[in-house]
Image (spheres, rainbow, N blue to C red):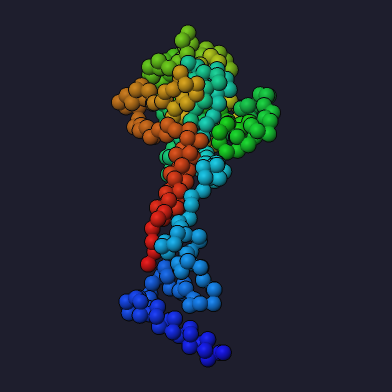
Amino acid sequence: MGDAAVGARSGREGEEHRGRPADAAYPAADDSVTSGKHLSAGGGDGPGDGQPPTEQGGSGDGTPRAKQPRSFWKELPILIGIALVLALLIKTFLVQAFSIPSDSMQNTLQKGDRVLVDKLTPWFGSEPERGEVVVFHDPDNWLAGEPTPDPNPLQKVLSWIGLMPSAEEKDLIKRVVGVGGDTIECKGTGPLKVNGKALNEPYVYPGNTPCSQDDQGGQFKVKVPEGHIWVMGDHRQNSRDSRYNRADSNDGFVPVDKVVGRAVVIAWPVNRWTNLPVPDTFDQPGLGTSSSAAALSAAPQGLALAGAVPLVLWRRRRYGDGTGRQEG
């Protein structure tokens, strides 16, 4: 029986071999698609229709089925996660949003405005320049007695990733009037003088005088030490700035290392979108050289999404490009 069965099997194999070309009897050894996937002769081990098995349930022609891309809803958490990480990095190193808490910078800035602050250029050694509007950490209890808001958990999360200003950080925003080595003087109602040059200040709040006539600090003549700046609010008669903090440990000057960055654009509300350039009065001859830093005009969440979306689309396209392609 065993010999007869073997003989019958050999006969069938001989008939199959005679019924097809000789080069088809033994597939090429380097065929990456069909190698190792030959149909067994008899024994019922292969499909009953005589077709070779396929990879991953593909069609009977031996073409592998490409990996399908994830659905949009499965990609969405990845997109959000990438956006949050990018927003945190952008807040830390590039740009951060701040809310204006008072009227001390009117009419340049209104209470409730949202400004974007360039934090990138200080990383390259750039220091504040005359005429710039800057955000800085409280140098020495300038905000003593001011109420501190109590944010809810959601606001804490949004402030941590840079979508809202932090309530825990005590920061101020003023205009830089003098830098290290400058002599600043206010006499009478003004004008304000920097290195003996009178400033024409159209940004000063209407009805205010450039200098304040009082005995609490409105009249002064100071020389700014190196590594420091002298700041004043545009609403001169409603700003507790360098003039009125002469009793602190820095004599009213702000150390440069306390500066967070330059406010470059008003981002909110929409009807107040504008940039914050250095006024021409600080470019007059003899005052000193000045150059403006480039403005970053996109919100952190916008920059984060701009970076995350192409990455997700690339991943989807990477999977999609393999559809219907045969390997080997």
Place residue 306 in its image quadrant.
Answer: top left
Where's the C terminus, which quadrant?
bottom left
Q: Is residue 257 visible?
A: no
Place residue 286 in its image quadrant.
Answer: top left
Task: Name which residue lies at 47% across and 13% down.
Answer: 205
Q: Nearer the viewer, residue 24 or 258?
A: 24
Q: Nearer the viewer, residue 109 or 270?
A: 270
Q: Is residue 51 visible?
A: yes
**Is 288 situated left or right of 165 in this image?**
left
Name, please, the residue furthest toward the bottom: 3
Task: Name which residue lies at 47% across and 26% down.
Answer: 267
Q: Nearer the viewer, residue 260 or 241?
A: 260
Task: Name which residue lies at 40% across and 55% down.
Answer: 324
Name, please, the residue furthest toward the left: 285
Q: Nearer the viewer, residue 179 or 296?
A: 296
Where's the N terminus, which quadrant?
bottom right
Residue 159, horizontal then vertical, whole percent: 60, 34
Name, please, the residue furthest toward the top: 207
Check the image and report above or below for 299 versus 59: above
Residue 291, horizontal then vertical, whole percent: 35, 33
Residue 12, horizontal then vertical, whole percent: 44, 81
Task: Name which residue lies at 56% across and 90% down.
Answer: 2
Check the image and report above or below for 119 versus 103: below
